[in-house]
Image (cartoon, rainbow, N blue to C red):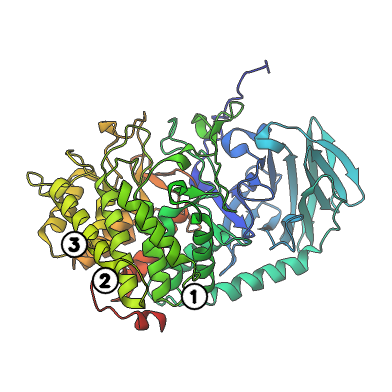
Amino acid sequence: MPVGEVPQADPARNPRIEDLALIGNTHSAALIADDGTVQWLCLPRFDSPALFAALLGNDGNGSWRLAAADPAARRSRCYRPGTAILETRFETETGTATIIDFMPVPEHEAQIDLIRIVRGDAGMVEMATEIRFRFDYGRSTPWLRQHEHGLIAIAGPDAVLLTTAVELENRDFATFAKFPVKAGETHAFTLTWFPSHLPTPRPRDPEPLLEETETRWRRWIGRSEYEGPWRDQVERSLITLKALTYRPTGGIVAAPTTSLPEWIGGSRNWDYRYCWLRDSTFTLYALLSSGFREEAAAWSDWLLRAAAGMPNELQIMYSIRGGRRLMEYELDWLPGFCGSRPVRIGNQAYAQLQLDIFGELFDTFHTARRYGIDPSAHSWPLQKVLIGYLEKIWQSPDEGIWEIRGEPRHFVHSKVMAWVALDRAVKSAEEFGLEGPVAEWRVLRDRIHDDVCGKGFDTELGSFVQYYGGKTLDAALLILVQVGFLPPEDLRIRGTIAAIERGLLRNGLLRRYSTETAVDGLPDDEGAFIACSFWLCDAYALCGRLDDARRLFERLLGLANDLGLLAEEYDPVGQRQLGNFPQAFSHVALINTAHTLTHAAGPAHQRASQAKAGTSARQLRSR
């Protein structure tokens, strides 16, 4: 291939995002296609360079296929109940075999394992594997050498040890093997990452690790307190959320992928392997409502550490370890998923001003206090400093919740979340006896409320609008009723919901906003944003439209793939998932809406009630 030429995506593959499955170990995650190919794996962490990057190109960018040698073999797959252990079954004319894929929780970060066990179920099946190790997002072909237990691949700081009793052959910068598996037999492959400058780690026995991993997952999900008609879907979403958690810090990545397109062939391709402050309150409610206080406390602690420092340096997102510099650049050697370029690493939106994050932080810390998991005595002094800064900047235009790359505007959702920050500061002082200039905060809170109602509501439309002076709509306006800005019976709330139904619903699913207005400064289109449709369910529920809420909720559950996983967006015309996958925000929204539709005091009701005086914090802590 000539220097500088970009490899082309293979059109024959016709990949679909919903073909992927997730396995993880609360440090990193792998995405495995339904044909048994590992198409994405970053080691040792979610945000590390990928070892297998075929998802954003082709097999030459790194992949590991393990499957029946017969291309006509029938395939099916499932998770072991209550776990993130994937089983892919192959049926041929001669027999049946299953691949068991999992990632055990590591003992330390200097050794990360991905284990694939081939189990013979009936008769005999001829199996085949093809591995192309490509470090640094498919750019670096490693040095391969034999090892007493298999082989080692080394490139710069990274090394992997592939341990197996199957005889391997290296040719044309790839590793191959064919082998039979009979009923009752197993053949294991263990891929172990380690720093190349350290001694080669000792292989661990796969079978005990499988048993330990299964026990760990089932014990964890056994703590779930959700009891309702959608238990399977909620528990799969909770397991997914746990798999997207970086255990050392408690941070939760928005997704384990980068640059999966919001429109096939488009350029709205972003790196989501970071932690967003905007997700904080939604995530906290999903965890607390489901009984996972330890994880909620770890998430709250992560938020406090990330937000600590000068208030003018507060960012909208951070790395899983709390890092702040997330410089964005493009990988020109990758053609992108289905030819969707560019492929981006890093996310320049980290430098944007988004006023809504102040409201999210204050809502999160207030909720944590009410549930009795206040992260630290230091959170209140930090909050007081943040309020002082917010008082100076709340009237500034910003880039809004959707991280537009057009000109900053006075987004209504942003102003409302500034109001939330003041409202929760007042409520925290009132409910918990915390010291602060509460009278001044009340005045500013009321001033922001009046500003939004005066400048953000359009009387002709009978609706709040996307930004001051505009006529366009935004699905984020549904949050107004959730945060208690106005009660659900207020005609302005009812009118906003009706306007959003008229203007943003397409084929029964909700778009974030109209991309035709060019407010975001980006070309191309995008799909329906899945979390926003869940928000519409919540709005229906708060307004008493329970039948509408349940119908839409059931429709949304049907968008998940065969394993119960959801991406960021959905194309209702092409009937395919879009955007990074699996998306924590989508699964968090599913969990919260299921609770809201199951319980009279679900997350949407609880969050809305926080703006009302007299709500019992003791009742929440006793849940």
Question: In the rendered view, would you say 78 is above or below 508?
Answer: below
Query: What residue is pinned by disc 1?
Result: 224
Query: What residue is pinned by disc 2?
Result: 609
Q: Is residue 566 left or right of residue 111?
A: left
What is the quadrant of residue 100 in the picture? bottom right
Amino acid at circle 2: Ser
Task: Please tell me which residue is depicted at 43% across the width and 75% down the height of the picture.
Answer: 226
| Disc 3 secondary structure class | loop
Query: What residue is pinned by disc 3?
Result: 486
Q: Is residue 140 left or right of residue 588?
A: right
Quadrant for the N terminus in the image = top right
Of the two numbered discs 1 and 3 in the rendering, the one whose residue sits closer to the viewer: 3
Quadrant for the C terminus in the image = bottom left
Amino acid at circle 3: Leu
| Disc 2 secondary structure class | helix
Q: Position of residue 380 (x, y in %)?
A: 43, 67
Q: Position of residue 542 (x, y in %)?
A: 22, 66
Q: Position of residue 400 (x, y in %)?
A: 33, 44
Of labels 1 and 3, earlier in sequence is 1
